[in-house]
Image (cartoon, rainbow, N blue to C red):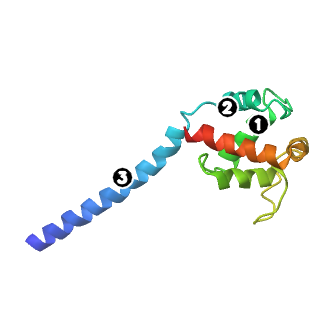
């Protein structure tokens, strides 16, 4: 009877640990939602990079739409450089994998991103990564 009780205890403990891990992973996006809003970060970046066009539309700007696309549409993590690069590739309409995923950005947004120099885009992505890593 002691071995069965020990087995039951270990099985229950393992199950609880797996469930706790799942709950912690679900809780991470809630913590990420406490970061500054997309518009606030976009406005900070416009202060840092005044040459980037705002492309205002319905109380949003090019950068706020780009951040929203990255975080909400593609559901990519905000702290990794490569993920920001992939979102930028979507905006530049560069195929890097599954076709059809990069048609979310409007043509005006794509043209505005294409008008930026490669260095400007790199600096922008680095700044986004830095802002969200805080």
Task: Give SS at disc 1.
Answer: helix
Binning the other alpha carbons within 10 Å of mark 1 as few (below 14), some (14 to 19) or many (20 upward) gives: many
- Mark 1–mark 3 CB contact (< 8 Å): no
**Residue 115 location, quadrant:** top right
Quote the CA–CA distance across marks 1 and 2.
Answer: 9 Å
The residue lying at 22 percent from left, 65 percent from top is: 10
The residue lying at 80 percent from left, 43 percent from top is: 120
Residue at the spot of label 1? 63
In depth, the one of 18 and 92 nearer the eye is 92
Looking at the image, the residue that sits furthest to the left is: 1
Q: Earlier in the sequence, mark 2 or mark 3?
A: 3
Q: State whether residue 89 is above or below residue 56.
A: below
x, y (%) of residue 130?
A: 61, 41
Q: Is residue 24 left or right of residue 47?
A: left
Residue at the spot of label 3? 20
Binning the other alpha carbons within 10 Å of mark 2 as few (below 14), some (14 to 19) or many (20 upward) gives: some
Residue at the spot of label 2? 41
Task: Give SS at disc 2.
Answer: helix
The residue lying at 85 percent from left, 30 percent from top is: 57
x, y (%) of residue 64?
A: 74, 35
In what quadrant of the picture does the C terminus appear? top right
Q: Nearer the viewer, mark 1 or mark 3?
A: 1
Q: Earlier in the sequence, mark 1 or mark 3?
A: 3
**Residue 1 location, quadrant:** bottom left
Q: Earlier in the sequence, mark 1 or mark 2?
A: 2
Image mark for residue 98: none
Q: Nearer the viewer, mark 2 or mark 3?
A: 2
Binning the other alpha carbons within 10 Å of mark 3 as few (below 14), some (14 to 19) or many (20 upward) gives: few
- Mark 1–mark 2 CB contact (< 8 Å): yes
Whether residue 53 is visible, yes or no, is yes
Task: Give SS at disc 3.
Answer: helix
């Amino acid at each position: 009877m002691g071995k069965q009780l020990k087995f039951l205890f270990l099985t229950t403990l393992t199950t609880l640990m797996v469930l706790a891990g799942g709950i912690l992973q679900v809780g991470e996006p809630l913590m990420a939602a406490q970061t500054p809003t997309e518009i606030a970060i976009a406005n900070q970046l416009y202060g840092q990079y005044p040459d980037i066009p705002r492309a205002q539309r319905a109380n949003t700007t090019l950068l706020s739409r780009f951040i929203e696309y990255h975080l909400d549409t593609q559901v990519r993590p905000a702290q990794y450089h490569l993920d920001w690069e992939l979102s930028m590739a979507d905006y530049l309409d560069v195929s890097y994998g599954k076709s059809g995923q990069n048609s979310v950005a409007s043509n005006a947004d794509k043209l505005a991103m294409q008008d930026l120099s490669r260095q400007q885009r790199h600096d922008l992505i680095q700044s986004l990564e830095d802002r969200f890593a805080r």
